[in-house]
Amino acid sequence: MNTMFRKSMLSVAGLAFAGGVFAGPIAAHANPVDAKPVAVAVQSAAPKPQGDQSHLTLNDEQTANVKAIIAATKKAGLPERAAVISIATSLQESKLVNLGHLGDANDHDSLGLFQQRPTSGWGTPEQITNSEYSTTAFLKGLQQVDGWQDMPLTQAAQTVQVSAYPDAYAQWEQQATDLVSQHWNS
């Protein structure tokens, strides 16, 4: 937590405490009939997408891959947030297309939904191009990141993927969230 925010919060807490100490005895003698309800603003616990958001119209193959990622996430016993991070990562890495060997256009030996590399220990080419396997491998990496549930999506994804473009995952958070909301219970 940054220092300025912490000091601000402590100041507010101090004022609230002081107000309670001084006003408490007075308030105890107030007429309860005159009390008015107070509206309280509550922030949602769900993280807000960072930065400008991108959107991709999905075809049947991409939608099937979304459903496969969600199924693997459920099978691993992980929450919807894990599926959101996984889908956003796949949107960035492959646009939700299960990439095979792309010849000279390929980034090293990257394959599959997450552009995982056999030479980096993600599995064999056959395993990496299996959507359930590649998602499970990604999720295992995600689970090794301390506090992944509460960190910004792009930080969680980057910690697993180690991309040359670490901030690029953030642009897909809203679409990934919408896709998980749409398909999680279907």
Image: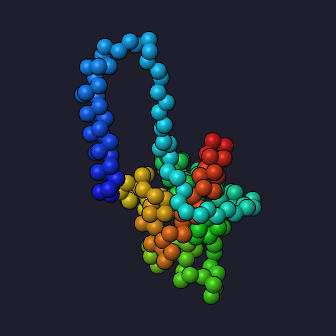
What scheme was used to colour the molecule? Answer: rainbow
| Residue 147 position within the rendered picture, expressed as x and y whole percent measured from the top left | 37, 54
| Residue 6 position within the rendered picture, expressed as x and y whole percent measured from the top left | 30, 51
**Residue sitting farthest toward the bottom:** 104
- In the image, 167 versus 5, the foreground residue is 5
Above/below status of 69 relative to 45: below
Horizontally, is 8 left or right of 116 in the view? Answer: left
Quarter of the rendering occupied by the N terminus: bottom left
Residue 124 visible in image: no
Horizontally, is 48 left or right of 147 in the view? Answer: right
**Residue at 29% in and 51% down:** 7
**Residue at 28% in and 45% down:** 10
Quarter of the rendering occupied by the C terminus: top right
- In the image, 174 versus 138, the foreground residue is 174
How many discs appear?
A: 0
Above/below status of 14 relative to 167: above
| Residue 47 position within the rendered picture, expressed as x and y whole percent measured from the top left | 49, 51
- In the image, 39 versus 49, the foreground residue is 39
**Residue at 46% in and 58% down:** 152
| Residue 92 position within the rendered picture, expressed as x and y whole percent measured from the top left | 59, 68
The answer to which image quadrant residue 132 occupies is bottom right
Residue 52 visible in image: yes
Above/below status of 155 relative to 29: below
**Residue at 25% in and 27% down:** 22
